[in-house]
Amino acid sequence: MSKERPVITNDEWNVTVLIADDEPGHVNLVKRNLKRAGILNEIMHFNDGQEILDFLFRQNGSEGRDSNTAYLLLLDIRMPKVDGVEVLRRIKECSQLRSLPVIMLTTTDDPREVTRCHELGCNNYVTKPVDYEEFVNAIQRLGMFLRIVKVPELAD
């Protein structure tokens, strides 16, 4: 007899998950495996660093983030227009966005990049494994981690 996993819904954990990643295959794997891990929250996808900055900073005609809403960002490093390290730097320099949890989710495992992202204020750094099964397992473990994280709302 298998145990049924409790499901986290928007009513219990009202956090919108933001994914900034230019690889559609990675994004689909992340979404699918977060769902398998019980994360049924709204997920918004951004194709590059400029799109996520426009959303968060409400600029360049973007509808932008909602006031007093909790967000969590899964951020790739290697993206077009603005890379993830620069996105992270801008977020953590802004007093209104500084509390936004940012998890670097990237194929880059260079220790200098890991150190730099932590120095800039990322909350966690997860390397995307190259192997499909390892990648799936890593995202499911990330989903389990997200189920216990407390995320603050962003203020104006």
Image (cartoon, rainbow, N blue to C red):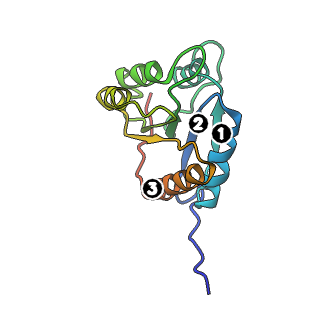
- Dot 3 falls on a residue whose secondary structure is helix
Point out residue 125 in the picture as x, y percentages from the top left corner. Answer: 41, 39
Residue found 64% across the figure and 20% down from its top: 62
Report the Cα–Cα distance between label 1 and label 3.
Answer: 18 Å
Point out residue 66 in the picture as x, y percentages from the top left corner. Answer: 56, 33
Of 105 and 62, which appears nearest the observer?
Answer: 105
Mark positioned earlier in the residue sequence (2 or 3): 2
Amino acid type, callout 2: Ile
Q: Is residue 91 visible?
A: yes
Q: Residues within 10 Å of mark 2 (few under 14, many from 20)?
A: many
Residue that label 3 marks = 145
State whether residue 82 is above or below residue 138.
above
Res. 79 mark? none
Q: Nearer the viewer, mark 1 or mark 2?
A: 1
Of 36 and 107, which appears nearest the observer?
Answer: 107
Q: Are marks 2 and 3 in contact (CB under 8 Å)?
A: no
Point out residue 22 in the picture as x, y percentages from the top left corner. Answer: 64, 27
- Dot 1 falls on a residue whose secondary structure is helix
Mark positioned earlier in the residue sequence (1 or 3): 1
Q: Quadrant of the C terminus?
A: top left
Q: Is residue 40 visible?
A: no
Q: Are marks 1 and 2 in contact (CB under 8 Å)?
A: yes
Report the Cα–Cα distance between label 2 and label 3.
Answer: 16 Å
Res. 27 mark? 1
Mark positioned earlier in the residue sequence (1 or 2): 2
State whether residue 123 is above or below residue 13.
above
Q: Spot the residue most to the front.
A: 131
Amino acid type, callout 1: Val
Q: Spot the residue most to the bottom.
A: 1
Residue that label 2 marks = 19
The answer to whether residue 101 is left or right of residue 105 is left
